[in-house]
Image (tube, rainbow, N blue to C red):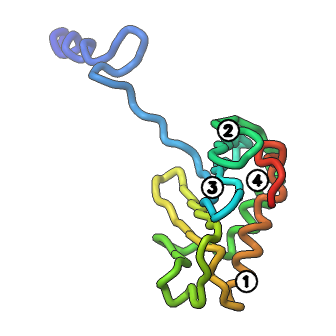
Amino acid sequence: MGLGLLALAGCVRPSGEPAGPGKPVAIESDSIRYETGPCYGRCPVYSVTVRPDGTGMFEGKRFTAVTGERAFRLTPAQYDAFAAKLAPYRPASGQVRYAPGQKNCEPAVTDASSVDVTWTRAIGDSQGLYFYYGCRSEKNRPLGQALGDAIEGLPIHDLIGERP
């Protein structure tokens, strides 16, 4: 019995951390990632990721007031409002795309911006919605408007800067 305990003792470090090449990886919490795409012109290109715990990350890429990553905080009410504005358009599973050449994007004009939203749950699955603002069908107008308006309640206006 003493040998068994001695053998087991070798599997745990004195600090209580497991032995082996690496530590367990923590699972991230739920998140919503909202990423804009470029257009022909000076459209702001950035991504923003928010979590229900109030943490957020902004990454300015092009034509934004801030370039690079910046952490920010948001209130539970801001997160809930953002999530609620996007919820009606969240696919049940997988990814839905509104892009040129697809039936849900007729007619389409060129050189418009886009938005790519990804909902990720802590269990690891995700759903995505890609919308190209050049999809000019009347039936797509409410979706485009809702996606564009969704970020209005987030505290990132100073990071984005003036939008054209």
Secondary structure under tag 3 reads strand
Which label is found at residue 26? none
Mark 3 and mark 1: Cα distance apart in space: 22 Å
Left or right: 1 as drawn, with respect to 73 = left
Q: Residue flagged by tag 3: what amino acid is it? A: Ile
Crowding near pointer 2: few (<14 within 10 Å), some, many (20+)?
some
Q: Nearer the viewer, residue 111 or 118?
A: 111
Q: Residue flagged by tag 4: what amino acid is it? A: Tyr
Secondary structure under tag 4 reads helix
Q: Nearer the viewer, residue 161 or 59?
A: 161
Left or right: 69 as drawn, with respect to 104 = right
Q: Earlier in the sequence, mark 4 or mark 3?
A: 3
Which label is found at residue 79? 4
Location of mark 1 (residue): 141
* Image point (61%, 60%), residue name: 38
Q: Residue flagged by tag 1: what amino acid is it? A: Arg
Q: Earlier in the sequence, mark 4 or mark 1?
A: 4
Location of mark 3 (residue): 32
Residue 50 point in image, percent of width and height: 68, 48
Which label is found at residue 67? 2
Mark 4 and mark 3: Cα distance apart in space: 9 Å
Q: Residue flagged by tag 2: what amino acid is it? A: Thr
Query: Mark 4 or mark 1, which is nearer to you?
Result: 1
Query: Mark 1 or mark 2, which is nearer to you?
Result: 2
